[in-house]
Image (spheres, rainbow, N blue to C red):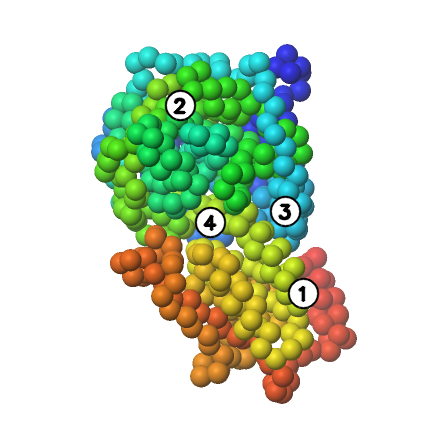
Amino acid sequence: MSDSAQPAAQDLRRFLADYRAAYPDDVLEVGEPVSADQEITAIASALAEQGRHPLLLFPQVRPADGAAGVVRGSASTVTNLFGSRQRIGRMLGVDAAGIHAEYQRRARDLRAPQELASGPILDLVQQHNIDLHSLPLLHHFATDRAPYITNGVIIAEHPQQGYGNMSFHRAMLHGKDALATSLHSRGHLWRLFQAAQELGRPLAAAMVIGAHPLFMLAGAARLPLGMDERHVAGGLFGAALEVVRTPRHGIAVPAYAEYVLEGEIDPTEKVDEGPFGEFTGYSSNRSTNNLFRVQSILRRRDAMLVDVLGGNSAEHLNLGRVPRESEMVEKLKERFPSVTAVHYPSSGTHFHAYVALRQARPGEARQIMLGLLGWDPYLKTVIAVDEDVNIMRDEDVLWALATHFQPHRDVVIMDGLPGSALDPSASGIGTTSRMGLDATRGPDFDGLRARLSDQAMTRAQEILGRLQRQ
Ligand SMILES: [Mn+2]
């Protein structure tokens, strides 16, 4: 396949070329040189202030000076792939409203990876004199301790049972051949690490930095322990993930990845890690302080850096949330057919959800909110509204709250539940309270909505149409 004229379907570069050709207005290339020290985050953040979330390309990145001046590498950088729902929909061939159903349909179609004899990620393989300062690392925020890899998908296998897992973990430059990382979500990689630790062994791991966006989305998938997210990648592609083996530990990584760092997570050593600008919008140093010792650097010729914007950027939130949200929406609609829509607004980081429903029985909104609050470990507040409220818009939900909701009657609060370790308002032991706000109109509501006649609305559109043509 490497000798065919058409670049491979799982290649990020083909995705970028196709996307640019199809949606030139949704791609912004910043041609002038920018510094790896915060300037990429700053440009994305200034655009977001204007309500703009284009895919961002930076062909010329200068290594950072000052505190991060040890970094010498630079590369053409792409970021904000997941900054808009419309773009994520396009990756899946649907509009933004169709993401949940399409994601679930594809993610269920599990396909085992297909091993290739070789692939571009094996273009340049370095196993001696490892120096991570040669990588194109970005310093994202002034409050970050050091340059960070924000797009590190760690692939590892259970030391005895053998099943694979992949998940995102932030990783900080720690030394020539070492990264400091956090397994703070205490998810599946944490379990694999503990199994290796009990055997007194390091955990072999490969960190993939930069691949096709559907591979990245699979890295954020939520699966039961024992199921391998690489199989979800195959489902999302509609074809087996094409992989090659890493030279030292034989871990199957995408053949078209841009960079792969292969090495071991040390069973005992603890290192300083953080603070780092997290999804809450706060800088966090809550970390498991793990050491990832890098033994091989694999890279494509002219490798690009694929970054994920940090902090509470739409990109960071969307990437983490789309798979979880899709699962929750499916589960909730299956159990409660009255639910018409579910939305997790970016304004709520991962902690708020809005649910719209066609209420058939009194109390149903409360029951639905309890379901969602019980199932989703990150949620703190759910607001329920009637189906005519557009839950994609914060202001419409807040209007429903303002006009349909009585605090003494419509609040459900529970305390003493496990919460996100990164929530700065959670207790020292990581517990949180959770709340449901019932902003449905309810059976006794007799407000009459102010409305306009169809005739007047049609006339208004005619008149405004003429004005715009002048
Ligand atoms: Mn997993």
Q: Nearer the viewer, residue 34 or 131?
A: 131
Q: Amino acid at mark 2?
A: Glu
In terms of secondary structure, where does tag 4 sit? Answer: helix
Q: Separation of disc 4 and disc 3 at Cα?
A: 18 Å
Q: Nearer the viewer, residue 455 or 237?
A: 237
Badge 4 vs badge 3, beta-carbon distance below 8 Å: no
Kind of residue at disc 1:
Pro
Residue 317: which numbered mark, if any?
4
> What residue would you read off at disc 2?
262
Which residue shows up at 73% across the image and 78% down it?
453
Residue at image position (41%, 17%) is: 248
| Residue 40: quarter of image | top left
The quarter of the picture where residue 385 lies is bottom right
Q: How many angstroms separate mark 4 from mark 2 (CA)?
A: 27 Å
Residue drawn 61% across and 80% down? 362
List the residue tagged with mark 1. Answer: 337
The quadrant of the rendering that contains the N terminus is: top right
Total numbered labels placed on residues in the image: 4
**Residue 449, how many percent across, how many down?**
64, 81
Q: Earlier in the sequence, mark 1 or mark 4?
A: 4
Q: Nearer the viewer, mark 1 or mark 4?
A: 1
Mark 4 and mark 2 lie on one chain; the one further toward the N terminus is 2
Given this view, does label 4 or label 2 mark the residue nearer the observer?
2
Taking the image as shown, residue 182 lies to the left or right of residue 214, namely left
Q: Is residue 214 above or below residue 348?
A: above
